[in-house]
Image: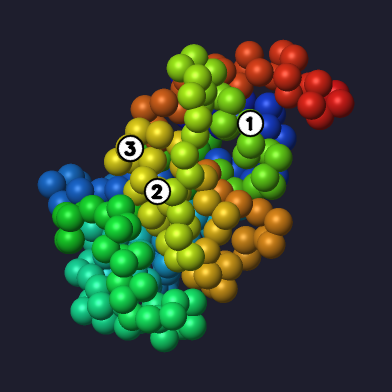
Amino acid sequence: MENKVISDKLKEILQLRYEPVAVKLVKKSEDIPADFNQPEKKTRHCQSIMKARTGECLLIPADKHACVVGGSSLGLLETPDNVRSGEFHSKIGMFDTHEAAAKMIEERAEFEECSMQATVVCPLEKADFKPDVVVLIDLPETLYWIVPAFTFEKGGRVTLSTAPFQATCVDSTIIPIQTGDVNFSMGCFGCRRTTDIGRDEMLVGIPGPILEDIVKHLEKLYEKPIKKARGL
């Protein structure tokens, strides 16, 4: 199934208000795609995702990533000592101690330092590559349907892994890639402070390898459960 077809189906079935965002991490061993614009100014991963949901395509090399916290978790930059120690985040006022903040960083999902050289983000319908993960940003009810789509065949429960920081980079990008499972996030301090994400919006990351199955399951759910729940 082509990316545009998948994107169209996601938008139609879920009634998405924004474009599904395709994300690719470019390893050091890979060639950097040539047909993408680089931002003029340094950009955070969360900011690039929000730009992509409204139509922009961006290539952000390591030296253009503005957030060292996100950039280091994505394997683009080294993790600064004040981040590892908890000093950076505790100074913001969301942790009682440096140790509490350090525990968040210690337990976060991350790629090996400096193993990646860039991130590529764009609307899924425009992506000429297989995405590592697709990120959706929308209302809770809209994204809820990813849960039954994920459990449609195997059942079970969906476990959410999140923290006060790194909703877009860790929660919605890295965790889905590393686990192969969908992961939801309610947003974080960073993305809510520096992007246009709405107070009523949240995120979900869908691993690229299971994207087509998710869409097929959504199509089946739309035949009855979605229509019934939405009063269609």
Q: Is residue 91 above or below residue 169?
A: below
| Residue 176 in the image, given as x and y percentages of width and height | 38, 41
Left/right of residue 183 with respect to residue 170 in the rendered view: right
Residue drawn where x is 52% and y is 64% of the image: 188
Q: Which mark is residue 179?
A: 3
Label 3 is placed on what type of residue? Answer: Thr
* Label 2 residue SS: helix
Q: How many marks?
A: 3
Q: Is residue 6 above or below residue 125?
A: above
| Residue 68 in the image, given as x and y percentages of width and height | 32, 72
- What residue would you read off at disc 2? 173
Q: Are marks 2 and 3 in contact (CB under 8 Å)?
A: no
Q: Are marks 2 and 1 in contact (CB under 8 Å)?
A: no
Label 2 is placed on what type of residue? Answer: Thr
Q: Is residue 210 above or below residue 169?
A: above
Residue drawn where x is 47% and y is 39% of the image: 159
Name the residue nearer the viewer: 173 or 102.
102
Label 1 is placed on what type of residue? Answer: Trp
**Colour pattern:** rainbow
| Residue 201 in the image, given as x and y percentages of width and height | 66, 54
Q: Which mark is residue 26?
A: none
- What residue would you read off at disc 1? 145
Residue drawn where x is 36% and y is 27% of the image: 209
Residue drawn where x is 23% and y is 58% of the image: 75
Lower sequence index among marks 2 and 1: 1
Q: Is residue 177 above or below residue 198?
A: above
Which of labels 2 and 1 is toward the front?
Answer: 1
Give me the C-alpha separation between circle 2 and circle 1.
19 Å
- In this view, which residue lies farthest toward the left? 29
Lower sequence index among marks 1 and 3: 1
Quadrant (top left, top right, bottom left, bottom right) of the C terminus: top right
Q: Quadrant of residue 141?
A: top right
